[in-house]
Image: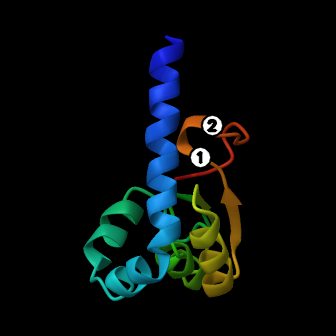
């Protein structure tokens, strides 16, 4: 089991390193993607008049965190990349957590979606 955990940690570290090295290119390559259908599908099950607490797991540079914030929701971003977290904070002004997917530390039942 320890070997498997070490391998996952290596993969995670390599992935984060890749995003840190390519953060600007990733931002410019994704910031104008048309994803309104995804937003609509995600929000569909929720009451229309409720302000939601939302977690964007793997928020990258903050495009989606910012979008949900503009709708009036309390959006929090989370990413493993230090550089993407800084970009997301600067772009969205929302709370951004730097954590890895393998080592999440989130309060229980804090988010609606």
Numbered label attached to residue 3? none
Q: Who's the residue at 69% across and 75% down the image?
A: 94
Q: How far apart are marks 2 and 1 (CA)?
A: 5 Å
Q: Where 74 falls versus 103 (above or below)?
A: below
Residue closest to the eye, 13 or 87: 13
Q: In which quarter of the image is residue 102?
A: top right
**Which residue is drawn at the image coordinates 32% and 83% (left, top)?**
29
Q: Is mark 2 on a helix, strand or loop?
A: helix
Q: Residue furthest top?
A: 1
Q: Residues within 10 Å of mark 2 (few under 14, many from 20)?
A: few
Q: Where is residue 19 in the image (x, y as percent from the top left)?
A: 47, 65
Query: Could you say where residue 43 lies in the image, as x and y percent from the top left?
Result: 41, 64
Q: Number of numbered discs present?
A: 2
In this picture the colour scheme is rainbow
Residue situated in front as seen by the camera: 53 or 101: 101
Q: In which quarter of the image is residue 75?
A: bottom right
| Residue at numbered disc 2 | 103
Q: Position of residue 11 (x, y in %)?
A: 43, 40
Query: Against 54, is 13 above or below?
Result: above
Give the structural element (helix, strand or loop) at label 1.
Answer: loop
Circle 1 residue: 100
Q: Which residue is drawn at 39% across and 85% down?
A: 31
Q: How crowded is mark 1: few (under 14 residues within 10 Å), some or many (20 or more)?
A: some
Which residue is drawn at the image coordinates 57% and 52% (left, top)?
112
Q: Nearer the viewer, residue 112 or 23?
A: 23
Q: In this view, does 48 lie above or below 103?
A: below
Q: Do the residues labelled 2 and 1 touch (CB within 8 Å)?
A: yes
């Amino acid at each position: 089991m320890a070997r498997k955990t070490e391998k996952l940690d290596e993969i995670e570290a390599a992935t984060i390193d890749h995003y840190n090295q390519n953060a600007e290119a990733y931002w410019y390559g994704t910031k104008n993607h048309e994803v309104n259908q995804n937003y609509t599908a995600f929000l569909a099950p929720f009451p229309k008049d409720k302000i939601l607490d939302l977690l964007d797991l793997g928020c990258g540079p903050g495009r989606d965190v910012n979008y949900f914030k503009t709708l009036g929701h309390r959006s929090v971003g989370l990413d493993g990349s230090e550089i993407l977290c800084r970009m997301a904070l600067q772009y969205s002004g929302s709370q951004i957590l730097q954590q890895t997917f393998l080592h999440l530390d989130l309060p229980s039942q804090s988010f609606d979606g």
